[in-house]
Image: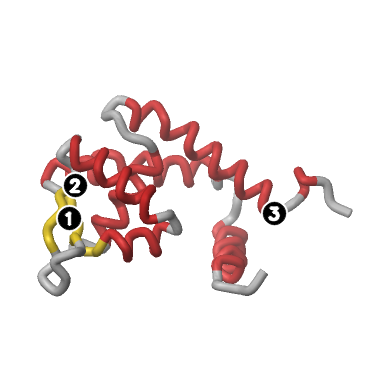
C-alpha cells in the first residue's frame, strides 16, 4: 500500500504548490494571485469567452469565476461585455492593461517550469506530458 506522500496526486499537488510559491512575489506586486493570472491566460487565449465557459475550462465553480472576474475588473485587467446572443450572459476580454500583465509575467510561468525540469531530459518530459494528458482525460472515478 502507498503512503499519501507516494501518490501521484500528492506529487502533483507539491509541484503546483512550488509553482505558486515561486510566482507569489511576482503577482503580489500587482495585487493578484497565480490563479488570477491563469484565469487571465484563459481570456488571452479565448477572447470573448463567456463566464460560464470560462468556469468549465478553468474547472472552477461559476461563483468563484464571478468573484475572480470582479477582482480583475476592479484592477482594469478584464472587461465584461453583454453577449450579443444572450443578454443575460457576459463575454470577457482582457483590457490593454491586462494584456500587458500577460506579456510582462509570462516568463514567471515558463521560468518556474524550466527550474522544475532542469535535470529532466526532453525525452522524459515528453513522456511525462503524455502520461499527464491521459490522466487529465475525462474518466469516471
The disc, 2 or 1, on the residue closer to the chain's N-terminal end is 2
Numbered label attached to residue 8: 3
According to the picture, the residue beneath numbered tag 1 turns out to be 93
According to the picture, the residue beneath numbered tag 2 turns out to be 78
How far, Cα to Cα, is label 3 from label 1? 35 Å
| Circle nearer the viewer, 3 or 2 | 2
| Residue ranking furthest to the right | 1
Q: Mark 1: few, some, or many residues within 10 Å (few <14, many ≥20)?
A: many
Look at the image and tell me whether residue 65 can be seen: yes
Element under disc 3 = helix
Q: In x, y percent, where is residue 82?
A: 12, 61
Position of the C terminus by quadrant = bottom right
Q: Quadrant of residue 131?
A: bottom right
At horizontal 16% and vertical 71% (from top left) the residue drawn is 86
Look at the image and tell me whether residue 123 can be seen: no
Element under disc 2 = strand
At horizontal 37% and vertical 59% (from top left) the residue drawn is 55
How far, Cα to Cα, is label 3 from label 2? 35 Å
Amino acid at each position: 500500500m502507498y503512503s499519501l506522500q507516494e501518490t501521484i496526486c500528492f506529487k502533483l499537488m507539491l509541484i503546483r504548490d512550488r509553482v505558486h510559491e515561486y510566482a507569489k512575489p511576482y503577482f503580489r506586486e500587482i495585487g493578484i494571485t497565480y490563479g488570477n493570472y491563469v484565469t487571465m491566460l484563459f481570456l488571452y487565449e479565448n477572447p470573448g469567452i463567456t463566464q460560464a465557459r470560462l468556469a468549465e475550462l478553468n474547472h472552477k465553480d461559476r461563483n468563484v469565476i464571478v468573484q475572480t472576474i470582479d477582482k480583475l475588473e476592479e484592477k482594469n485587467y478584464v472587461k465584461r461585455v453583454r453577449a450579443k446572443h444572450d443578454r443575460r450572459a457576459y463575454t470577457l476580454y482582457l483590457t490593454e492593461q491586462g494584456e500587458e500583465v500577460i506579456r510582462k509575467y509570462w516568463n514567471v510561468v515558463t521560468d518556474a517550469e524550466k527550474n522544475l525540469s532542469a535535470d529532466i531530459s526532453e525525452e522524459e518530459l515528453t513522456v511525462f506530458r503524455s502520461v499527464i494528458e491521459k490522466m487529465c482525460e475525462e474518466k469516471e472515478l
